[in-house]
Each structure stands twice: as C-alpha cells, then as structure tokens.
Image (cartoon, rainbow, N blue to C red):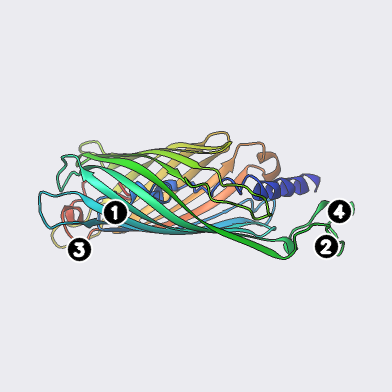
Amino acid sequence: MKKTLLSIAAIALISLGVEAQQDYHFSQFFASPITYNPANSGAFESDVRAAINYRSQYGSISEPFKTFAFAADAPIKLTKKAYDRNFLGVGLFATNDNTGDIEFNNFHIAGNVAYAIDLGGTNENPHFVSLGLQFGYMQRSQNFASATWERQWDGTGFDTGVANGEQHAGKVTESNFDFGGGMSWFYSINDRSRVLVGAAVLHANRPQVNLLGNDEALMTKATGHISAAIRPADSEVTYLPNIFVMFQGPNRIIDVGSEIEFSLWDRTQSTRFKNNLSTNLGAYYRVQDAIYFIGRVNYHDFSFGLSYDFTISKLAANNNGRGGVEIVLTYQKAFSGPGNNRQKLYKSKGL
C-alpha cells in the first residue's frame, strides 16, 4: 500500500511539474511523423496519409494515463509541369492527453506546412529536402477538486472532507499558441531502399504555462529521427530500422529499434483482384526507461499496430515492469501514379 501511494504521489508530481515541461510521446512514433517534425508533412510516396493513436499507461498503479491523437497529411503538386517535382506538404494533428486521478489534461492542435525541393529524383524514386513550419494551439487544465493533499492523509487513507489548504479550487484552465520548424531529407535510393532523416525545434516561442499562476515558459523541444526501409533483392522481407531522439530541458527520450516486415502476398497488378498483405514484428529500447514490442498487420491501404511497453526504470519496482499499451490505425492511399501500382516495397510506415 505504501509503495502504491508513493508511486501515485510521484506520478502526480511528474504530472504537475515535469509533465508540464515534457510533451506526450508515443512508442509507435513513426506512425505519425508530422507530430514531431513539420517538415515530414507530405514526405511519403502516396497521396494521403492518416493515423489514429491511442495509448494507456500506469494502469497497474493508478488511474491510467490516456493519450488520443489524430494526424493527417498530404503532398500537393504546385504545377502540372512534368519536370517540376517540387511540392507543398500540408498536415494537421490533434492530441488529447489525460493524466490519471488528478485529471490534468493537455490538448494540442497544430497545422503544418512544408515545402519540398527536388534534388534530382524521379517519379518512381523521389529525392528531396523539405523545410516545414508548425503553428499550434495548446490548452491545459487541472481539476483540483479531484486531487488529494498531504493534510488530508489520516494515516490509512485520504479524507477528502478535510480542507486541503490550497489556494486553487475547482478547474483551472490556461491556453496559448506555439510554433516550431524543422527540416527533413527523403531519398528513395531504388525500388527496395528508402531513407528519411530529419530534425526539428518545437515550442520555439516558449509559450507560457502558468497553470498555477507562476510565470513559467514551456521549454523548447528538439527532435531528431532516422528511418529506413530496406528490402534485399529477391526477398519477401523488409527491414525497417528507426532512431528517435527528443530533448526538452532536462528531459530526454531516445528510442532505438526496428521492425521486420514479412510480405505474405502482393497486390495483383492488372486486375487488383488480390490486395497486398503483410505482417510486422519489432522490438525497441527506450534508453533507461522501457523495452517494447510491436506487432502489425498491413492490408491494402490500412495498417493496424499494437505495442506494449515493459518498464525497466526505477518505477518497475512499483508497477511490476508493466508499462503501457498502444494501438495505432493508419491509412495511406495512392490514387494515381507509380505508387498506386508498384508493390516492390510496401510502405506501411510512411516511407
């Protein structure tokens, strides 16, 4: 009981302190790359891409922390000239992050715009660098009526009938605008190999986060990422390595890992009688925090992914190593062009 209470207290402090300075993070970060780098908007070989994320964690020791997110983006051709392969990338995403018993909520909606400059690629194997901007609106709230405090502890539990002695009561809300920018490089080396590399600076204007009346600015967040898709010749297996890093003040996230995609069958090229089907298995390590495993099924234009985190940090002593479950549904469609017919390298993760 004591360990559970301490864990809940620690999570509450994180929510009011560190969480106020650290954004949400998904284990399947690669499913919606426009959330951590606006330059990734439109950086894929189809016409439209969308993803829905759901994450639940810390359910073993308190009310689960739940995060919902939606993201969509598309490339827009600026001219009809065949030789002009520059394009505009646009994207929109929204997240809603709910923090356990204390009902701390963080809502964020943002729009991205990016401009991709052709570096000598072709329609079938594009090669470009992209520069992007992100403009967002954030709203944070805390329901102090749902929180418990030290003076309410009677030795065996919290007596909510006792005055908490705090100056804040009820629900407190604050909102602000923020913006950021980034750049990325996409290179389709051939029909079997692709790479996406990028970096971004978010919350560049350091918006105020004065939920408790303090004059405090949100820390700038820096992200970096490397993703690749490699399918050896005459192979039905594609390797999908990923590296993601994030620094926000004293907080750090580093994810390293890979998926292996097994192609069960390809799309019938002429009649479309049969749609492509593949499955993924993967493992990742989040430095000094967790290891997690991913399973995914890809059919036609849809992909369904499920992952589970196992805590390896000090918190594992209280949650028995159980971290969080995450579900992702993605949709990526090519309406015309070579990406509509070619299935030499199935692009289940936006590459």
* Residue bearing mark 4: 151
Crowding near the residue tagged with mark 4, few <14, some 14–19, many ≥20 C-alpha atoms within 10 Å: few
Name the residue at 80% across, 57% down. 166
- Mark closer to the chain start, 3 or 2: 2
Name the residue at 31% across, 45% down. 131
Mark 2–mark 1 CB contact (< 8 Å): no
Residue 321 in the image, given as x and y percentages of width and height: 63, 42
Helix, strand or loop at disc 2?
loop
Left or right: 233 with respect to 288?
left
62 or 179: nearer the viewer: 179
Helix, strand or loop at disc 4?
helix
* Residue bearing mark 3: 273
Mark 1–mark 4 CB contact (< 8 Å): no
Inter-mark Cα distance, 2 to 1 = 51 Å
Inter-mark Cα distance, 1 to 3 = 32 Å
* Residue bearing mark 2: 160
